[in-house]
Image: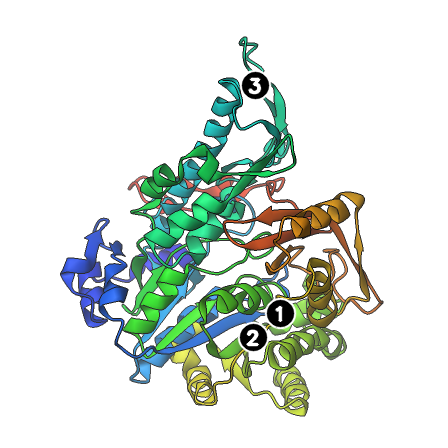
Amino acid sequence: MNDIEIAKSIKLEKIGEVAKKFGIDEEYIDQYGKYKAKVSNKLTKDLKDKENGKLILVTSINPTPLGEGKTTIAIGLSEAINRLGKKSVLTLREPSLGPVFGIKGGATGGGYSQVAPMEEINLHFTGDIHAITTANNLIAAVIDNHIFHGNELKFKEVIWKRCMDLNDRALRKVEIGLSKEKKMVPREDGFDITVASEIMAVFCLAESLEDLQVKLSQIVVGYNEDGEPITVKDLKIEGALTVLLKDAFNPNIVQTLEHNMAIIHGGPFANIAHGCNSVVATRMGLKLGDYVVTEAGFGADLGAEKFVDIKCRKTGLNPACAVCVATLKALKYHGGASIEECKEENPEALEVGIENLLKHVSNIKNVLGMNVVVAINKFQNDTDKEIEILSNRLKEVGVELSLAEVWAKGGEGALDLAQKVMNLAEQEKTATPTYSLDESIKEKIEAVAKKIYGAEGVEYSEEAEKEIERIEKLGYKHFPVCIAKTQYSFSDDAKNLLCQEPFTIHVKEVVLKTGAEFVVVKAGKIMTMPGLPKVPSAESIYLDDNGEVVGIF
Protein backbone atom coordinates (compact mmCIF):
# COMPACT_ATOMS: atom_id res chain seq x y z
CA MET A 1 0.00 0.00 0.00
CA ASN A 2 1.09 3.58 -0.57
CA ASP A 3 1.08 6.27 2.15
CA ILE A 4 -2.44 7.54 1.59
CA GLU A 5 -3.84 3.99 1.46
CA ILE A 6 -2.08 3.11 4.72
CA ALA A 7 -3.38 6.28 6.37
CA LYS A 8 -6.94 5.53 5.29
CA SER A 9 -6.73 1.89 6.42
CA ILE A 10 -6.41 2.90 10.07
CA LYS A 11 -9.48 3.99 12.02
CA LEU A 12 -8.75 7.33 13.67
CA GLU A 13 -9.88 8.35 17.13
CA LYS A 14 -11.94 11.50 17.50
CA ILE A 15 -9.59 14.37 18.22
CA GLY A 16 -11.29 15.15 21.54
CA GLU A 17 -10.34 11.67 22.80
CA VAL A 18 -6.73 12.12 21.72
CA ALA A 19 -6.61 15.52 23.44
CA LYS A 20 -8.06 14.05 26.65
CA LYS A 21 -5.28 11.39 26.79
CA PHE A 22 -2.74 14.22 26.80
CA GLY A 23 -4.48 16.25 29.48
CA ILE A 24 -6.35 18.83 27.37
CA ASP A 25 -9.83 19.62 28.66
CA GLU A 26 -12.68 20.24 26.23
CA GLU A 27 -12.89 23.92 27.18
CA TYR A 28 -9.58 24.64 25.40
CA ILE A 29 -10.54 22.95 22.11
CA ASP A 30 -12.15 24.35 18.98
CA GLN A 31 -12.82 21.38 16.68
CA TYR A 32 -12.43 21.50 12.88
CA GLY A 33 -14.41 18.37 12.04
CA LYS A 34 -13.82 15.00 13.75
CA TYR A 35 -10.06 14.65 13.51
CA LYS A 36 -8.42 18.04 13.84
CA ALA A 37 -8.78 20.94 16.24
CA LYS A 38 -7.27 24.15 17.47
CA VAL A 39 -6.15 24.50 21.09
CA SER A 40 -6.30 27.86 22.82
CA ASN A 41 -2.95 29.31 23.87
CA LYS A 42 -4.66 29.96 27.20
CA LEU A 43 -3.85 26.31 27.98
CA THR A 44 -0.11 27.03 28.08
CA LYS A 45 -0.69 30.01 30.38
CA ASP A 46 -2.83 27.90 32.70
CA LEU A 47 -0.07 25.25 32.84
CA LYS A 48 2.70 27.79 33.47
CA ASP A 49 3.67 26.17 36.78
CA LYS A 50 3.94 22.66 35.27
CA GLU A 51 7.50 21.48 34.62
CA ASN A 52 8.53 21.39 30.97
CA GLY A 53 9.29 18.14 29.19
CA LYS A 54 12.53 17.56 27.32
CA LEU A 55 12.91 18.94 23.79
CA ILE A 56 14.34 16.57 21.14
CA LEU A 57 15.51 18.07 17.82
CA VAL A 58 15.38 15.92 14.66
CA THR A 59 17.57 17.10 11.80
CA SER A 60 19.37 15.40 8.92
CA ILE A 61 22.14 15.32 6.35
CA ASN A 62 21.73 17.43 3.19
CA PRO A 63 18.63 16.03 1.46
CA THR A 64 18.77 14.27 -1.89
CA PRO A 65 16.19 13.17 -4.50
CA LEU A 66 16.15 9.84 -2.64
CA GLY A 67 14.67 11.40 0.50
CA GLU A 68 15.97 10.94 4.03
CA GLY A 69 12.62 10.56 5.81
CA LYS A 70 13.28 13.12 8.54
CA THR A 71 9.59 13.70 9.28
CA THR A 72 8.90 9.96 9.13
CA ILE A 73 11.66 9.33 11.70
CA ALA A 74 10.43 12.17 13.93
CA ILE A 75 6.91 10.70 13.97
CA GLY A 76 8.19 7.15 14.57
CA LEU A 77 10.48 8.35 17.37
CA SER A 78 7.60 10.07 19.14
CA GLU A 79 5.47 6.92 18.76
CA ALA A 80 8.27 4.80 20.22
CA ILE A 81 8.75 7.04 23.26
CA ASN A 82 5.02 6.68 23.95
CA ARG A 83 5.37 2.89 23.62
CA LEU A 84 8.10 3.02 26.28
CA GLY A 85 5.65 4.49 28.76
CA LYS A 86 6.46 8.19 28.55
CA LYS A 87 4.24 10.89 27.09
CA SER A 88 5.71 12.24 23.87
CA VAL A 89 4.20 15.10 21.89
CA LEU A 90 5.20 15.71 18.28
CA THR A 91 5.51 19.30 17.03
CA LEU A 92 5.86 19.81 13.27
CA ARG A 93 5.47 22.53 10.65
CA GLU A 94 2.38 22.83 8.48
CA PRO A 95 2.87 21.64 4.88
CA SER A 96 2.88 24.24 2.12
CA LEU A 97 0.79 23.70 -1.00
CA GLY A 98 3.84 24.60 -3.09
CA PRO A 99 5.64 21.25 -2.60
CA VAL A 100 2.36 19.29 -2.42
CA PHE A 101 1.53 20.28 -5.99
CA GLY A 102 5.18 20.59 -7.04
CA ILE A 103 7.85 17.92 -6.72
CA LYS A 104 8.53 17.21 -3.02
CA GLY A 105 5.00 16.13 -2.11
CA GLY A 106 3.39 16.35 1.30
CA ALA A 107 4.97 16.57 4.73
CA THR A 108 3.06 14.16 6.95
CA GLY A 109 5.52 11.26 7.15
CA GLY A 110 5.15 7.92 5.41
CA GLY A 111 4.09 4.30 5.74
CA TYR A 112 3.01 3.45 9.30
CA SER A 113 4.75 6.56 10.63
CA GLN A 114 2.33 9.32 9.64
CA VAL A 115 0.17 12.08 11.08
CA ALA A 116 -3.48 12.03 10.06
CA PRO A 117 -5.78 12.93 8.38
CA MET A 118 -2.88 13.25 5.94
CA GLU A 119 -4.78 14.61 2.93
CA GLU A 120 -6.46 17.34 4.99
CA ILE A 121 -3.19 18.34 6.70
CA ASN A 122 -1.43 18.51 3.32
CA LEU A 123 -4.19 20.60 1.72
CA HIS A 124 -6.01 23.51 3.39
CA PHE A 125 -5.75 22.09 6.94
CA THR A 126 -7.31 24.72 9.27
CA GLY A 127 -6.61 27.66 6.96
CA ASP A 128 -3.60 29.10 8.83
CA ILE A 129 -1.43 29.58 5.76
CA HIS A 130 -4.32 31.23 3.91
CA ALA A 131 -4.71 33.65 6.85
CA ILE A 132 -1.01 34.50 6.63
CA THR A 133 -1.31 35.01 2.85
CA THR A 134 -4.22 37.40 3.39
CA ALA A 135 -2.40 39.36 6.10
CA ASN A 136 0.68 39.67 3.89
CA ASN A 137 -1.39 40.91 0.95
CA LEU A 138 -3.37 43.34 3.08
CA ILE A 139 -0.08 45.14 3.77
CA ALA A 140 0.66 45.24 0.02
CA ALA A 141 -2.83 46.55 -0.80
CA VAL A 142 -2.63 49.27 1.87
CA ILE A 143 0.79 50.40 0.65
CA ASP A 144 -0.40 50.89 -2.93
CA ASN A 145 -3.65 52.45 -1.74
CA HIS A 146 -1.64 54.90 0.37
CA ILE A 147 0.49 55.87 -2.62
CA PHE A 148 -2.63 56.22 -4.80
CA HIS A 149 -4.19 58.64 -2.32
CA GLY A 150 -1.28 61.06 -2.18
CA ASN A 151 1.64 59.20 -0.59
CA GLU A 152 1.65 61.12 2.69
CA LEU A 153 4.44 58.90 4.04
CA LYS A 154 6.60 59.80 1.00
CA PHE A 155 7.33 56.24 -0.16
CA LYS A 156 10.36 56.24 -2.45
CA GLU A 157 11.18 52.52 -2.25
CA VAL A 158 8.69 49.71 -1.52
CA ILE A 159 10.37 46.50 -0.31
CA TRP A 160 7.23 44.57 0.67
CA LYS A 161 6.21 41.78 -1.74
CA ARG A 162 2.90 40.04 -2.29
CA CYS A 163 2.68 36.29 -1.70
CA MET A 164 0.75 33.11 -2.47
CA ASP A 165 1.11 29.53 -1.25
CA LEU A 166 1.92 27.93 -4.60
CA ASN A 167 5.05 27.54 -6.72
CA ASP A 168 4.78 30.04 -9.60
CA ARG A 169 8.04 31.30 -11.11
CA ALA A 170 6.15 33.71 -13.43
CA LEU A 171 5.33 35.86 -10.38
CA ARG A 172 8.90 36.42 -9.22
CA LYS A 173 8.85 39.82 -10.93
CA VAL A 174 5.67 41.59 -12.05
CA GLU A 175 4.53 45.06 -13.06
CA ILE A 176 1.57 46.42 -11.10
CA GLY A 177 -0.58 49.54 -11.34
CA LEU A 178 -1.15 49.26 -15.10
CA SER A 179 -4.85 50.22 -15.12
CA LYS A 180 -4.00 53.78 -16.30
CA GLU A 181 -6.19 55.37 -13.63
CA LYS A 182 -5.30 59.00 -13.10
CA LYS A 183 -3.47 58.60 -9.76
CA MET A 184 -2.19 55.06 -10.27
CA VAL A 185 1.58 54.74 -9.97
CA PRO A 186 2.95 51.72 -11.90
CA ARG A 187 5.91 49.98 -10.31
CA GLU A 188 7.82 46.70 -10.32
CA ASP A 189 6.71 44.21 -7.70
CA GLY A 190 7.05 40.48 -7.06
CA PHE A 191 5.66 37.52 -5.15
CA ASP A 192 7.22 35.26 -2.54
CA ILE A 193 5.75 31.92 -1.57
CA THR A 194 3.74 32.41 1.63
CA VAL A 195 6.09 30.28 3.74
CA ALA A 196 8.87 32.79 2.94
CA SER A 197 6.75 35.78 4.00
CA GLU A 198 7.93 37.77 7.01
CA ILE A 199 4.40 37.36 8.36
CA MET A 200 5.07 33.61 8.61
CA ALA A 201 8.34 34.21 10.46
CA VAL A 202 6.69 36.68 12.86
CA PHE A 203 3.77 34.27 13.38
CA CYS A 204 6.18 31.48 14.33
CA LEU A 205 8.39 33.55 16.65
CA ALA A 206 5.69 35.47 18.55
CA GLU A 207 4.99 34.42 22.15
CA SER A 208 1.43 35.80 22.42
CA LEU A 209 -1.16 37.79 20.45
CA GLU A 210 0.16 40.96 22.11
CA ASP A 211 3.71 40.08 21.07
CA LEU A 212 2.46 39.20 17.58
CA GLN A 213 0.92 42.66 17.19
CA VAL A 214 4.12 44.37 18.37
CA LYS A 215 6.25 42.35 15.95
CA LEU A 216 3.85 43.03 13.07
CA SER A 217 3.97 46.77 13.81
CA GLN A 218 7.79 46.73 13.54
CA ILE A 219 7.90 45.33 9.99
CA VAL A 220 9.69 47.65 7.57
CA VAL A 221 7.76 47.84 4.28
CA GLY A 222 9.71 50.56 2.49
CA TYR A 223 11.82 53.71 2.71
CA ASN A 224 10.89 57.38 2.34
CA GLU A 225 12.60 60.16 0.40
CA ASP A 226 15.03 60.73 3.29
CA GLY A 227 16.01 57.05 3.40
CA GLU A 228 14.11 56.46 6.63
CA PRO A 229 12.21 53.18 7.13
CA ILE A 230 8.39 53.09 6.86
CA THR A 231 6.74 50.45 9.04
CA VAL A 232 3.40 48.68 9.39
CA LYS A 233 2.82 50.93 12.43
CA ASP A 234 3.07 53.95 10.13
CA LEU A 235 0.34 52.37 7.98
CA LYS A 236 -1.83 51.95 11.14
CA ILE A 237 -2.87 48.37 10.30
CA GLU A 238 -1.13 46.22 12.93
CA GLY A 239 -4.48 45.78 14.69
CA ALA A 240 -6.21 44.61 11.51
CA LEU A 241 -3.39 42.15 10.80
CA THR A 242 -3.64 40.72 14.30
CA VAL A 243 -7.40 40.28 13.87
CA LEU A 244 -6.79 38.34 10.64
CA LEU A 245 -4.35 36.04 12.45
CA LYS A 246 -5.99 35.66 15.87
CA ASP A 247 -7.64 32.25 15.23
CA ALA A 248 -4.72 30.93 13.18
CA PHE A 249 -2.39 31.76 16.09
CA ASN A 250 -3.87 28.93 18.20
CA PRO A 251 -1.92 25.68 17.55
CA ASN A 252 -3.50 22.79 15.62
CA ILE A 253 -3.69 19.25 17.00
CA VAL A 254 -4.05 16.04 15.01
CA GLN A 255 -3.02 12.43 15.69
CA THR A 256 -0.43 9.90 14.63
CA LEU A 257 -1.49 6.53 13.23
CA GLU A 258 -0.94 5.13 16.76
CA HIS A 259 -3.37 7.73 18.14
CA ASN A 260 -0.81 9.93 19.88
CA MET A 261 -0.91 13.71 19.71
CA ALA A 262 0.81 15.89 17.14
CA ILE A 263 0.81 19.69 17.22
CA ILE A 264 1.26 21.06 13.69
CA HIS A 265 1.56 24.84 13.52
CA GLY A 266 3.44 27.36 11.39
CA GLY A 267 5.48 26.48 8.34
CA PRO A 268 8.51 28.55 7.26
CA PHE A 269 10.78 26.79 4.75
CA ALA A 270 14.33 26.22 6.00
CA ASN A 271 16.17 26.95 2.77
CA ILE A 272 14.55 30.40 2.37
CA ALA A 273 13.27 31.09 5.90
CA HIS A 274 14.04 29.90 9.45
CA GLY A 275 12.50 26.44 9.16
CA CYS A 276 10.90 25.83 12.59
CA ASN A 277 7.33 25.32 13.79
CA SER A 278 5.79 28.03 15.99
CA VAL A 279 7.15 28.90 19.41
CA VAL A 280 3.65 28.73 20.90
CA ALA A 281 3.24 25.15 19.62
CA THR A 282 6.61 24.10 21.05
CA ARG A 283 5.84 25.69 24.42
CA MET A 284 2.42 24.00 24.51
CA GLY A 285 3.99 20.62 23.74
CA LEU A 286 6.54 21.04 26.53
CA LYS A 287 3.71 21.49 29.05
CA LEU A 288 1.82 18.42 27.80
CA GLY A 289 4.56 15.84 27.31
CA ASP A 290 7.56 14.31 29.05
CA TYR A 291 9.28 14.67 25.68
CA VAL A 292 8.62 16.91 22.70
CA VAL A 293 9.97 15.67 19.36
CA THR A 294 10.37 18.48 16.86
CA GLU A 295 12.20 18.93 13.58
CA ALA A 296 14.01 21.74 11.85
CA GLY A 297 13.78 21.81 8.08
CA PHE A 298 16.20 20.30 5.57
CA GLY A 299 19.78 19.47 6.61
CA ALA A 300 21.44 20.50 9.87
CA ASP A 301 23.39 23.21 8.00
CA LEU A 302 20.09 25.07 7.58
CA GLY A 303 17.47 23.77 10.01
CA ALA A 304 19.55 22.95 13.08
CA GLU A 305 21.70 26.08 12.75
CA LYS A 306 18.65 28.36 12.55
CA PHE A 307 16.91 26.40 15.32
CA VAL A 308 19.78 27.27 17.67
CA ASP A 309 20.86 30.67 16.33
CA ILE A 310 17.35 32.09 15.88
CA LYS A 311 14.59 30.13 17.65
CA CYS A 312 16.47 29.00 20.76
CA ARG A 313 18.38 32.25 21.17
CA LYS A 314 15.17 34.31 21.01
CA THR A 315 13.12 32.09 23.31
CA GLY A 316 15.47 30.43 25.76
CA LEU A 317 14.35 26.99 24.54
CA ASN A 318 17.05 24.33 24.64
CA PRO A 319 17.11 20.90 22.97
CA ALA A 320 18.09 18.07 25.32
CA CYS A 321 19.71 16.27 22.36
CA ALA A 322 19.56 15.98 18.58
CA VAL A 323 18.90 13.17 16.11
CA CYS A 324 20.63 13.34 12.71
CA VAL A 325 18.74 11.31 10.09
CA ALA A 326 20.30 9.69 7.01
CA THR A 327 19.82 6.77 4.64
CA LEU A 328 22.56 4.58 3.22
CA LYS A 329 21.20 5.37 -0.26
CA ALA A 330 21.55 9.11 0.30
CA LEU A 331 25.04 8.75 1.75
CA LYS A 332 26.10 6.85 -1.39
CA TYR A 333 24.53 9.58 -3.51
CA HIS A 334 26.61 12.16 -1.61
CA GLY A 335 29.58 9.92 -2.40
CA GLY A 336 29.14 10.36 -6.13
CA ALA A 337 26.98 7.34 -6.98
CA SER A 338 24.08 7.65 -9.42
CA ILE A 339 20.55 6.98 -8.19
CA GLU A 340 20.68 3.49 -9.72
CA GLU A 341 24.10 2.77 -8.20
CA CYS A 342 22.76 3.80 -4.77
CA LYS A 343 20.38 0.85 -4.81
CA GLU A 344 23.25 -1.64 -4.86
CA GLU A 345 26.01 -2.33 -2.35
CA ASN A 346 28.67 0.34 -2.98
CA PRO A 347 31.15 0.64 -0.09
CA GLU A 348 33.41 3.05 -1.98
CA ALA A 349 30.66 5.63 -2.55
CA LEU A 350 29.44 5.11 1.01
CA GLU A 351 32.89 5.87 2.44
CA VAL A 352 32.97 9.19 0.55
CA GLY A 353 29.36 10.08 1.35
CA ILE A 354 29.80 9.47 5.07
CA GLU A 355 31.87 12.67 5.12
CA ASN A 356 28.65 14.65 4.62
CA LEU A 357 27.12 12.99 7.69
CA LEU A 358 30.28 13.41 9.76
CA LYS A 359 30.39 17.14 8.99
CA HIS A 360 26.78 17.53 10.17
CA VAL A 361 27.50 15.48 13.28
CA SER A 362 30.58 17.59 14.03
CA ASN A 363 28.56 20.80 13.58
CA ILE A 364 25.85 19.57 15.95
CA LYS A 365 28.36 18.43 18.60
CA ASN A 366 31.23 20.87 18.31
CA VAL A 367 29.66 24.08 16.98
CA LEU A 368 26.06 23.97 18.22
CA GLY A 369 26.99 22.12 21.40
CA MET A 370 24.37 19.34 21.41
CA ASN A 371 24.67 15.61 22.05
CA VAL A 372 23.62 13.68 18.94
CA VAL A 373 22.60 10.19 17.87
CA VAL A 374 22.49 9.15 14.19
CA ALA A 375 19.28 7.49 12.97
CA ILE A 376 19.50 5.47 9.76
CA ASN A 377 16.13 5.25 8.04
CA LYS A 378 16.58 1.58 7.13
CA PHE A 379 15.56 0.01 3.82
CA GLN A 380 15.31 -3.68 2.90
CA ASN A 381 18.33 -3.73 0.62
CA ASP A 382 20.71 -2.07 3.13
CA THR A 383 23.55 -4.57 3.64
CA ASP A 384 25.22 -5.60 6.90
CA LYS A 385 28.61 -4.72 5.40
CA GLU A 386 27.62 -1.12 4.69
CA ILE A 387 25.93 -0.72 8.09
CA GLU A 388 29.14 -1.94 9.73
CA ILE A 389 31.24 0.56 7.74
CA LEU A 390 29.01 3.41 8.92
CA SER A 391 28.85 2.17 12.50
CA ASN A 392 32.64 1.96 12.72
CA ARG A 393 33.11 5.49 11.37
CA LEU A 394 30.62 6.87 13.91
CA LYS A 395 32.33 5.01 16.77
CA GLU A 396 35.54 6.83 15.83
CA VAL A 397 33.83 10.16 16.62
CA GLY A 398 31.97 8.87 19.69
CA VAL A 399 28.45 8.89 18.22
CA GLU A 400 25.87 6.12 18.52
CA LEU A 401 23.97 4.68 15.55
CA SER A 402 20.40 3.42 15.56
CA LEU A 403 18.66 1.60 12.72
CA ALA A 404 15.02 2.71 12.44
CA GLU A 405 12.31 0.85 10.49
CA VAL A 406 9.43 3.22 11.14
CA TRP A 407 7.94 3.20 7.61
CA ALA A 408 7.12 -0.51 7.90
CA LYS A 409 6.69 -0.85 11.68
CA GLY A 410 5.69 2.55 13.06
CA GLY A 411 6.79 3.17 16.65
CA GLU A 412 7.92 -0.45 17.08
CA GLY A 413 10.62 0.23 14.49
CA ALA A 414 12.18 3.03 16.57
CA LEU A 415 12.30 1.53 20.07
CA ASP A 416 16.10 1.33 20.04
CA LEU A 417 16.33 4.93 18.80
CA ALA A 418 13.86 6.10 21.45
CA GLN A 419 15.84 4.47 24.26
CA LYS A 420 19.09 5.98 23.02
CA VAL A 421 17.47 9.41 22.71
CA MET A 422 15.99 9.21 26.22
CA ASN A 423 19.38 8.19 27.65
CA LEU A 424 21.14 10.99 25.79
CA ALA A 425 18.53 13.55 26.85
CA GLU A 426 19.50 12.92 30.49
CA GLN A 427 22.93 14.35 29.63
CA GLU A 428 21.43 17.62 28.34
CA LYS A 429 23.87 20.41 27.54
CA THR A 430 23.16 24.05 26.73
CA ALA A 431 23.21 24.64 22.98
CA THR A 432 25.76 27.19 21.81
CA PRO A 433 25.11 29.76 19.05
CA THR A 434 27.42 29.91 16.04
CA TYR A 435 28.17 33.60 16.59
CA SER A 436 27.68 36.47 19.03
CA LEU A 437 24.98 39.07 18.39
CA ASP A 438 27.64 41.74 19.05
CA GLU A 439 29.44 40.79 15.84
CA SER A 440 28.83 42.67 12.59
CA ILE A 441 26.44 41.24 10.02
CA LYS A 442 29.35 40.18 7.82
CA GLU A 443 31.08 38.49 10.76
CA LYS A 444 27.89 36.53 11.49
CA ILE A 445 27.51 35.46 7.85
CA GLU A 446 31.14 34.41 7.71
CA ALA A 447 30.88 32.50 11.00
CA VAL A 448 28.04 30.37 9.61
CA ALA A 449 29.74 30.00 6.22
CA LYS A 450 33.05 28.86 7.68
CA LYS A 451 32.03 26.98 10.84
CA ILE A 452 28.82 25.31 9.61
CA TYR A 453 29.25 25.05 5.83
CA GLY A 454 33.04 24.68 5.75
CA ALA A 455 33.41 27.48 3.19
CA GLU A 456 36.74 29.14 2.50
CA GLY A 457 35.18 32.61 2.49
CA VAL A 458 32.25 34.82 1.47
CA GLU A 459 31.85 37.13 -1.54
CA TYR A 460 29.25 39.92 -1.60
CA SER A 461 27.48 41.56 -4.52
CA GLU A 462 27.58 45.35 -4.67
CA GLU A 463 23.86 45.43 -3.83
CA ALA A 464 24.42 43.22 -0.76
CA GLU A 465 27.30 45.41 0.43
CA LYS A 466 25.12 48.52 0.25
CA GLU A 467 22.20 46.90 2.05
CA ILE A 468 24.41 45.60 4.88
CA GLU A 469 25.78 49.12 5.31
CA ARG A 470 22.24 50.57 5.41
CA ILE A 471 21.01 47.95 7.91
CA GLU A 472 23.88 48.62 10.27
CA LYS A 473 23.42 52.40 10.00
CA LEU A 474 19.75 51.95 10.91
CA GLY A 475 20.84 50.21 14.13
CA TYR A 476 20.03 46.57 13.34
CA LYS A 477 23.56 45.17 13.47
CA HIS A 478 22.54 43.09 16.52
CA PHE A 479 20.04 40.94 14.58
CA PRO A 480 20.89 37.28 13.86
CA VAL A 481 21.23 36.21 10.23
CA CYS A 482 18.94 33.78 8.38
CA ILE A 483 20.89 32.48 5.39
CA ALA A 484 18.82 31.37 2.40
CA LYS A 485 20.71 28.88 0.23
CA THR A 486 20.28 25.53 -1.50
CA GLN A 487 19.45 22.62 0.79
CA TYR A 488 21.26 20.07 -1.35
CA SER A 489 24.83 21.03 -0.52
CA PHE A 490 26.95 22.64 2.18
CA SER A 491 27.89 25.13 -0.55
CA ASP A 492 25.49 27.47 -2.37
CA ASP A 493 25.75 25.30 -5.50
CA ALA A 494 23.08 22.55 -5.59
CA LYS A 495 25.29 20.40 -7.83
CA ASN A 496 28.33 20.48 -5.55
CA LEU A 497 27.37 17.49 -3.41
CA LEU A 498 30.84 16.35 -2.37
CA CYS A 499 32.28 19.80 -1.46
CA GLN A 500 35.78 18.30 -1.70
CA GLU A 501 37.32 21.41 -3.23
CA PRO A 502 37.49 24.77 -1.38
CA PHE A 503 34.35 26.81 -2.07
CA THR A 504 33.05 30.31 -1.49
CA ILE A 505 29.57 31.44 -0.44
CA HIS A 506 28.21 34.11 -2.81
CA VAL A 507 25.84 36.59 -1.13
CA LYS A 508 23.59 38.12 -3.78
CA GLU A 509 21.03 39.99 -1.67
CA VAL A 510 20.38 40.97 1.95
CA VAL A 511 16.90 41.78 3.31
CA LEU A 512 16.06 43.36 6.67
CA LYS A 513 13.19 41.68 8.58
CA THR A 514 12.46 43.96 11.54
CA GLY A 515 9.30 42.13 12.59
CA ALA A 516 11.00 38.75 12.75
CA GLU A 517 14.12 40.52 14.05
CA PHE A 518 16.62 38.87 11.75
CA VAL A 519 18.44 39.61 8.48
CA VAL A 520 17.77 37.32 5.51
CA VAL A 521 20.91 36.63 3.46
CA LYS A 522 20.30 35.17 -0.01
CA ALA A 523 23.21 33.11 -1.33
CA GLY A 524 23.77 31.48 -4.70
CA LYS A 525 20.74 31.01 -6.97
CA ILE A 526 18.17 30.78 -4.18
CA MET A 527 14.64 31.99 -5.00
CA THR A 528 11.95 32.93 -2.48
CA MET A 529 9.30 31.95 -5.05
CA PRO A 530 9.98 28.38 -6.26
CA GLY A 531 8.91 27.08 -9.66
CA LEU A 532 7.10 23.90 -10.69
CA PRO A 533 8.91 20.93 -12.28
CA LYS A 534 8.14 19.84 -15.84
CA VAL A 535 5.70 17.23 -14.51
CA PRO A 536 4.24 18.61 -11.25
CA SER A 537 2.61 16.37 -8.66
CA ALA A 538 -0.63 18.25 -9.36
CA GLU A 539 -1.05 16.09 -12.48
CA SER A 540 -1.53 12.94 -10.36
CA ILE A 541 -3.89 14.31 -7.67
CA TYR A 542 -7.63 13.74 -8.13
CA LEU A 543 -10.88 12.54 -6.51
CA ASP A 544 -11.82 8.91 -7.11
CA ASP A 545 -15.36 7.62 -7.72
CA ASN A 546 -16.00 7.60 -3.97
CA GLY A 547 -14.95 11.24 -3.57
CA GLU A 548 -11.68 10.27 -1.88
CA VAL A 549 -8.43 12.18 -2.50
CA VAL A 550 -5.87 10.18 -4.47
CA GLY A 551 -2.28 10.97 -5.45
CA ILE A 552 -0.90 12.95 -2.49
CA PHE A 553 2.33 11.44 -1.23
Q: Can you see residue 94?
A: no
Disc 3 on helix, strand or loop? Answer: loop
Q: Nearer the viewer, residue 544 or 462?
A: 462
Whether residues under marks 3 and 1 lie with C-beta atoms below 8 angstroms apart, the answer is: no
> Disc 2 versus disc 3: distance between alpha carbons?
48 Å
Instruction: Tell me what residue is drawn at x 64 percent, y 71 percent.
Output: 434
User: Where does label 2 land, which residue?
Assistant: 324
Q: Residues within 10 Å of mark 3 (few under 14, many from 20)?
A: some
Q: Position of residue 365 (x, y in %)?
A: 61, 81
Give whichever of discs 2 and 1 has the lower sequence position: 1
Q: Can you see residue 275?
A: yes
Whether residues under marks 2 and 1 lie with C-beta atoms below 8 angstroms apart, the answer is: yes
Disc 2 on helix, strand or loop? Answer: strand
Q: Is residue 129 left or right of residue 474?
A: left
User: Where does label 3 land, which residue?
Assistant: 177
Q: Position of residue 517 (x, y in %)?
A: 53, 54
> Disc 2 versus disc 1: distance between alpha carbons?
7 Å
Q: Is residue 374 left or right of residue 80?
A: right
Q: Amino acid at mark 3?
A: Gly
Instruction: Tell me what residue is drawn at x 60 percent, y 44 percent.
Output: 528
Give whichever of discs 2 and 3 has the lower sequence position: 3
Residue 384 vertical position relative to residue 3 in the rendered view, above or below: below
User: Where does label 1 land, which residue?
Assistant: 61
Farthest residue in the front direction?
226
Kindly report which numbered mark, 2 or 3, lies closer to the viewer in this rendering: 3
Instruction: Tell me what residue is drawn at x 49 percent, y 43 percent.
Output: 194
Give whichever of discs 3 and 1 has the lower sequence position: 1
